[in-house]
Every structure is written in C-alpha cells, then in structure tokens.
Image: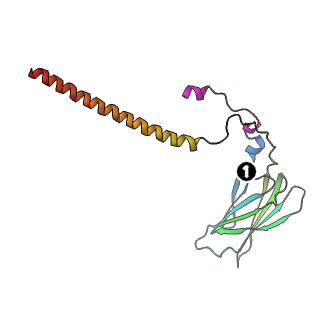
Amino acid sequence: MAALLSASPPARGPEFEPPSKEELSARASFTSKADDLLVTFSIKPNRPGQNFITLGVFNTRRPAPAPIDLVEVRLTPPGGQEVVLAAELLEEGKYQIVGDTINAGGDWQVNIRVVRPGLADSTLSTLWTVLPLQRNTVRRPVLISNQPLALTLTPLAIVFAIIAGIALAGVYVFGLRRRRLGTQISADEHKS
C-alpha cells in the first residue's frame, strides 16, 4: 500500500498550483499600539467581495482608564472614496465588521479610531494590500467519485475487525483444545 501511494504522481492542474508571490507577501494581520491600547486587525478572505474585518482592542493599563465606546474603521480604496464603518462588539476586546465594502484589489489605506469617554481618541493608520479576485479554475471531471470514503469504509473496517477478532479467538481456542488433546493422548500412552 505504501509503495502504491508513494509511486503515484503529484496532483497537477490549475486548482493545485501553489500560492502566488503576491498572495504570500500579503499580510494576514497586523498588531500595533495606539496610545495605551494594543490593536490587532485582519481581513478575511482579503479579496474583493464579502469580507470579515476582525479587530482586537485591548487596554494595556490596569485598571483601564475608561471603557471603549466606539471602534471605527475608515477604509480608502486606491483612487476611491473613503468609507467609514463602525465595528460591532463581539465580546470584550473583540470587534467585527461584516460586509462587501472591499470591492477592489490593491493598496487600501486603513485608519482605526477608538473612542473612550474622557480621553482623546486613539488612532492608528496602515497601508493594507487586498488581493485581487481569484481566477476561476476549471475543475477536472470526476472519474470515479469525489465523495469522502469514510462513511463507507468505517463500517466495513469495524465489520472486518470483528470478523478478524472472532477468527483469532477461534484459532486460539482450537489451539488450546489441540494442546489439551495432545497432552491427554500422551498421558494415556504413558499409562499403557
């Protein structure tokens, strides 16, 4: 089985190509300080269309000088109009924006503003590269099946294990009886 698996050629075709240099060089997330706050930022899948912008805003001072009232993200596309988005609080320190505001690939200007009562706004700016739309890859036709085999093979493996267990138990019991019978015959021969 190992020889069969190791002898098969690697997958070929556009759907199996490694990531491009552009995809490898694009940032997945960034972390920085804004005043006494630690801010993390990421966009997934980081392509034009529906995206999840995730932010972490954490106080580094204990006790925190003030609660966070608002986390705002300003996105400016290359050569486009700035869009202002308010992040939704998911849980303490974690915020998210969901939408299709990101509509083009390229270098976007990202400005993050954190508002706390009684304190000056904390701001942070960075340049963010949005990857272009993925090219459509033509999938090869399915020759046998593209369904997972676990649903079929798991019960078969269990049945095989049970049958093998019964067979081994039978061989063991048959061997014990044969030994006892052999011991009994030799004892009878010694008596006669």
Please tell me in which quadrant of the rendered image residue 64 appears.
bottom right
* Magenta segment boundaries in residue numbering: 1-19
Q: Position of residue 121 (x, y in %)?
A: 74, 72
- Determine if the magenta segment contains residue 15: yes
Q: Position of residue 134 (x, y in %)?
A: 80, 46
Determine whether 85 is above or below 157 in the image: below
Q: Is residue 170 left or right of residue 33?
A: left
Q: Which residue is mark 1?
A: 27
**Is residue 124 or residue 160 the one in the foreground?**
160
Secondary element under disc 1, as helix, strand or loop, is: loop
> Residue at horizontal 79%, vertical 55%?
127
**Is residue 14 or residue 91 the one in the foreground?**
14
- Determine if the magenta segment contains residue 12: yes
**Is residue 98 or residue 189 the one in the foreground?**
189
Q: Position of residue 129 (x, y in %)?
A: 79, 52
Determine whether 186 is above or below 61 in the image: above
> Residue at horizontal 30%, vertical 31%?
174
> Which amino acid type is shown beneath numbered disc 1?
Arg
> Residue at horizontal 47%, vertical 40%?
159
